[in-house]
Image (spheres, rainbow, N blue to C red):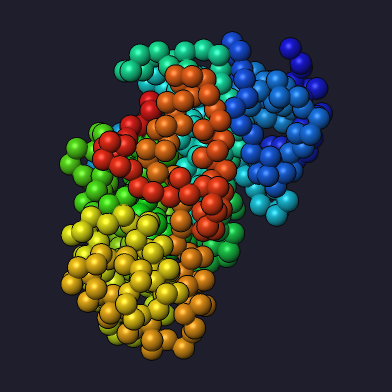
Amino acid sequence: MPSANRILNAVQIGTFDNHYAKLPERFFARVAPKTVAAPRLIAVNHALAQHLGLSLAHLAPQDQALLFSGNAIPDGAEPIATAYAGHQFGNFVPQLGDGRAILLGEVIARDGARYDIQFKGSGPTLYSRNGDGRAALGPVLREYLVSEAMHALGVPTTRALAATLTGERVLREQGPLPGAVLTRVASSHIRVGTFQFFAAREDQEALRALLDFAIARHDPTAREAENPALAFLQGVIKRQASLIAQWMSLGFIHGVMNTDNMTVSGETIDYGPCAFMEAYDPGKAYSFIDQFGRYAYARQPAIAQWNLARLAEALLPLIDEDEERAVATASAAITGFGPLYTDAYRRAMRAKLGLDGSQAEDDELLETILTRMHQAQLDFTGCFRSFAEAALAGDGTHAVHPLGTDEIGQAIMTRWHARLDRDARSRADLAAHMKSINPVRIPRNHRIEEVIEAAIRSNDFEPFHRLHAALQNPYQDDPAFTAYEAPATQDEQVAATFCGT
């Protein structure tokens, strides 16, 4: 087995460090990844590795498997599991933490930004709560595919650097399953729940240290503000308002919007029971454990605001020593989420329909179209993509029918075409812009399940690689990938998704 030093020299990590490990010991637990029996590489994101300044050119696949499974730890790494709390489906749990994740450290990428590198599924930690700390192959493949698809769609997200088989089995409700490790990259892994962890313990010293760390990483200008804690809170609110609007504009349902799954960086994190909605339904929820629809599609903005209110509560003693003034100040900031989100959402949805937003009736027209989509159970992604084709085809006989061929659908299309006719842009320019923001391919649930099934049943990863390739340019028509565009048939539909733990 090659030594960690030899692998380090080949990888040329350079600025590898772990600033989080320099915080007080109560922020984390030091733990090494548990070695695995027979690591085998599934995939490495070479483009991301290059961006991070990691040179893998001289590493054989087996050496890469050793590195990305945790069997070889490079110099500079200080493996830790971070502590955090969280509201899970509305119920506060004062101690959660990285139960199956280990933060190796940080690298400074070619753009000068600092990124965390973390293993998921690398063994038990102090926070595993009687779990095995391992990950099954299915959830690893899902997170790799969906996180990289989200990046290609232009959504802030954690990213997948590598996926590796462990050569071991993990026991889940379905029985023994192949184990795997995901190597994840993020601007940071600081969550709303990280602040809640110390607030619940009334540890203001730790709260202050965490705030200073988060400001230095994500909001350096807040340091100079009159009220740094408030400026930081406002920055998180702004980032999350933009993020949730992007989710909504793409029909994305996170599935488990607990406060420990909301980052202060504004990146999407933890792709467990997530899904992209097919038939438009504001009340759609996919997570098997979300029996009451707390995290349904249309509830995501309100849940985000609720989660941000929990962050504000944790920051109260740092916002103002006077509790009454702190509450008033934080409440005003949280109230500001609504207008920020609404503006971002409206702009995104108008643009999807080719509307410039200058007409008073645009929002009402949008709601009319969404109502029609719901009533007719139209595919969210396919319908909006068809509007781009309809814009190019022009009015007249309505050669393209995004809303159906009946009288109601055609009447709405006539109204939409009349609205476009008042736009100064050419139909060709409109259609081109609409295609640039309405994807033709998304990671549909049934396709992901096919990938997982092939990998588990037949040890066949070709479907995974092909689906991954199809999702890299989601806004471009490509005859090679047309099979990935259609929604699931009745027999292919996936009714529920699972967390994977």
Q: Position of residue 29 (x, y in %)?
A: 52, 26
Is residue 124 depicted above or below 487 in this figure? above
What is the x, y in percent for residue 434?
A: 46, 69
Image position of 66 with respect to 302: above or below: above
**Of 335 and 420, the residue lying toward us:** 420
Residue 319, image x, y percentages: 41, 58
Report if residue 173 is visible in the image. Answer: yes
Does residue 240 sit above or below 96 in this rendering? below
Q: Is residue 33 left or right of residue 401?
A: right
Q: Name the quadrant of the N terminus.
A: top right
Res 103 seen here: no
Residue 45, image quadrant: top right
Residue 186 in the image, given as x and y percentages of width and height: 56, 44
Q: How many marks?
A: 0
Q: Nearer the viewer, residue 499 or 314?
A: 499
Is 427 in front, or is 268? 427
Q: Residue at x 43, y 69 (%)?
A: 388
Quadrant position of the C terminus in the picture = top left
Left or right side of 185 for 126 = left
Q: Is residue 15 above or below residue 229?
A: above
> Relative to 78, is 227 on the left or the right?
left
The residue that appears at 75% across and 34% down in the rendered structure is 56
Residue in the image at 44% along x and 28% along y? 452
